[in-house]
Image (cartoon, rainbow, N blue to C red):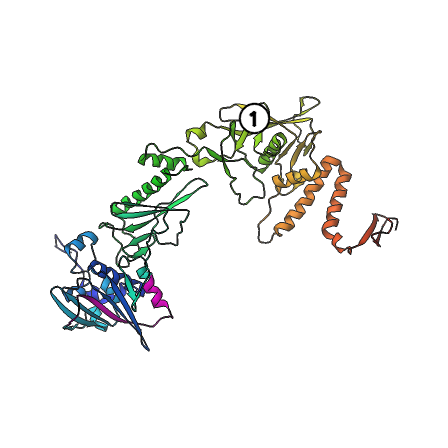
Amino acid sequence: MTTLTKLRARVSPQAISKVTRIFNGTLDDIFAELFQNARRAGATRVAVTAEHLDDACLITVDDDGAGITDPIDLVSLGQSDWSGECRTREDPAGMGFFSLAGLDTVVSSTSAVGSFSLGIAGDAWTGEADIEVLPWDGPRGTTIAFHFPPGPDGKLERTVEAAARFFPLPVTYNGKDLARTDFLADAYKIIERDGFRIGVFRDQHSPHVATLNFHGVTLKHAFPVIKEVHHTQWSVQVEIVDAPDLVLVLPARKEIYRNAVLDHLVELCRRAIFSVIYAEPLHRLSFEDWLEARSYCPDFSQAARQLPLWWPTLARDDYREVPRFADLETGAAIYDDTDSFDAVSFGRALRRSAGDEPHKLAGPEPLAFYEPITNIIGYPWYDGIRCFVRTGECFTHDGGAPAEGDETLTLRPDAIRLELTDQHGRRLDIETDFVIQESDDSWGDPDCARIALTQSSELSPDDLTDLIIDAVFSPSDDSDADSYDTQETRFRHDAAVRAHAILEGEDAAIIAGIRMAFADRIAWRIPHGRTLNLTWSRGGSHLQLADAGEGSDQ
């Protein structure tokens, strides 16, 4: 057992032997690191040149910065000779130059105290061979030349262009100025605070787009995204201006190191988004997000008094677009339907009441119904709206006698009344002529749905068929199921038979079924301009094709 009472962490000398594995050795990493070193050295420009040889590409990166004072710092992993100001502002790690590890490299530099040139190749990178320091007579700055394996046509040019795009210094490639772009050019609004430029973007968020520009090095970080309820989505991108304590995870620099400064930046991003929303004419923040927004700005207004107009949910809807939002009208109410049977029944009652305004209820107490939005529960204006659910229905016969305990699948009462109750226990009765209810197996078979239709209803067989389909038809998406069209055609046939039976009797239903089957499967075989005369009974059948003008007695 050791008897030591104190020790101190250190870097093993063997670590240098693994230096070629610290970086991926890609051109992206190399340009990113060399460009950053030039910027930290106070350069005003960076020049990249490339000469394509037979078996390699000779790439040179030249800058007019302060140069390197001591060559030993250049090849000492984790050590650098950056100025005190640079160390304070950026905390450089002294690893960037080793992105070239393993490549034949020549470095030539002139600083205020001297000049040198050195070549590094093979074992010299891992500390197993000496590196000869040679004299150099060149201008102030640093030139790094290295051999890189040849790649696909245009890849080198694209990589340099990408490295220069958001870099703060001008870059040339083979003498040509490369385009630079403001990282936040497309922002809806830019807010500068605490050493950050925060761009707030409207409806442009993508997980595949870089969100942080660290002096030209871009990376993806999941900064806050705030989505208004069925409205605008707000996101941010951040550019570092002067934030010395925000650092990247070494050595790859592909993610932000988690510390208090990152937490502070995240809070700044949320504050920036809320400040932009605050200036908008209206918003639809969830109640939870609105409470947070008020912690930054106490007079933050409530969400707009708007809700989507009520529209029935149909059984076949896998995905349903939210109806358009509209300002609340006088007599605004919410209807929270439970399923498609409830929704279709209520929708029929409203259409029967208000005609071409399918979300309104006419009568002595006119109401305009809207969809419930759970994310905004809590706003005083929303909680003050009457919210109805269906609590029952009443069928009456013989001028008012209720139909009790009738479980038949088809009812033809004299009157139907839907009973609704709001959150305060107050009831609302709505007269209608149609109700459809779920029963055993009704999701797959229109004959199993329980349907009540008043004796005086003016619904046609086609209208009733559509109501049954809307409430009941839910197509199967199993891999071995028929196509949607085939399932819908089959279901419509059965629904139409049921509708004709209710409204016109069994004979009419049989004829309707035959007519639909004939139209679907046989009619297309009759030649254009010809007539099929058909007689069919258990005793025999007679079919004859005739010209369209010939008599029906043939």
Q: Amino acid at mark 1?
A: Pro
Q: Is residue 55 left or right of residue 481?
A: left
Q: In which quadrant will I find the N terminus? A: bottom left
Residue 291 appears at what percent x and percent y? 36, 34
Q: Residue furthest left?
A: 113
495 left or right of 48? Answer: right
Q: Is residue 7 magenta?
A: no
Q: Secondary structure at mark 1?
A: loop
Q: Picture coordinates of residue 283 (x, y %)?
A: 41, 37
Q: Is residue 151 magenta?
A: yes
- Highlighted range, magenta: 136-161
In the image, residue 132 sits, relative to residue 469, either above or below, namely below
- Along the line of sight, which residue is nearer the eye, 279 or 201? 279
On the image, which quarter does residue 338 sit in?
top right
Is residue 75 among the parts visible in the rendering? no
Q: On screen, 414 above or below 33?
A: above
Give the x, y percent position of residue 273.
Answer: 35, 42
User: Which residue does the image show at 81% across and 52% down from the upper left?
Assistant: 531
Residue farthest toward the right in the current orientation of the protein: 553
Mark 1 neighbour class, 10 Å CA radius: few under 14, some 14 to 19, many 20 or more: some
**505 relative position to 302: left or right:** right
- Is residue 145 in view from this perspective? yes
Q: Residue at x 64, y 47 (%)?
A: 488
Q: Residue furthest top?
A: 400
**Residue lying at the far bottom of the rendered structure:** 54
Which residue corresponds to mark 1? 366
| Residue 477 in picture, x, y percent from top left | 57, 50
**Closer-to-camera residue (429/203):** 203
